[in-house]
Image: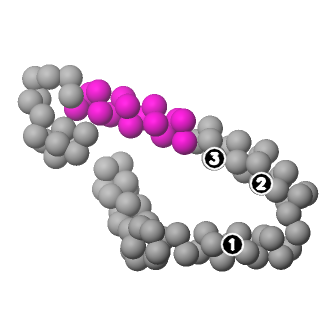
Amino acid sequence: MAEAVAGGADPNTNAIRNVKENMAAYARLIRVNIDKKDNILYAIADRILKPADEKKLSEAFGKVEPDEMGEGVHEKYHAWIEKLVGG
């Protein structure tokens, strides 16, 4: 995908179009997933989890980027997406 987006793919092929179509389909899938989390999963969690559980969970999530991905990776991906969509 990176090669096609960077212009490495032959423009006479369908590679660029396929990448765009697949990215759009993935974006739709992610939107549906986020909607389900926002409107179903989090509502259930709010009813079940105690404040102490929520605090522990929040702290654990806060460690994912620095410990697993590396500092600034999240922002790097946001900038890359903005560049791709022309924002």
Does the magenta stretch mainly form a helix, a strand or a loop? helix
Q: Amino acid at mark 1?
A: Ser
In percent of width and height, residue 49 lies at 85, 63
Q: Look at the image and tell me whether residue 75 can be seen.
A: no
Disc 2 secondary structure class? helix
Foreground pick, 51 / 82: 51
Q: Is residue 43 left or right of residue 12?
A: right
- According to the picture, the residue beneath numbered tag 1 turns out to be 58
Q: Amino acid at mark 3?
A: Ile
Looking at the rendering, which quadrant does residue 40 occupy?
top right
Based on the picture, tell me whether residue 27 belongs to the magenta stretch.
Answer: yes
**How crowded is the residue under tag 3: few (<14 C-alpha within 10 Å), some, or many (20+)?**
few
The colour scheme of the drawn protein is one colour
Q: Which residues are magenta?
A: 16-30
In percent of width and height, residue 77 lies at 38, 60
Disc 1 secondary structure class? helix
- According to the picture, the residue beneath numbered tag 3 turns out to be 34
Q: Residue at x 12, y 34 (%)?
A: 9
Disc 3 secondary structure class? helix
- According to the picture, the residue beneath numbered tag 2 turns out to be 42
Q: Amino acid at mark 2?
A: Tyr
Looking at the rendering, which quadrant does residue 12 occupy?
top left
Q: Is residue 64 left or right of residue 74?
A: right
Looking at the rendering, which quadrant does residue 70 occupy?
bottom left
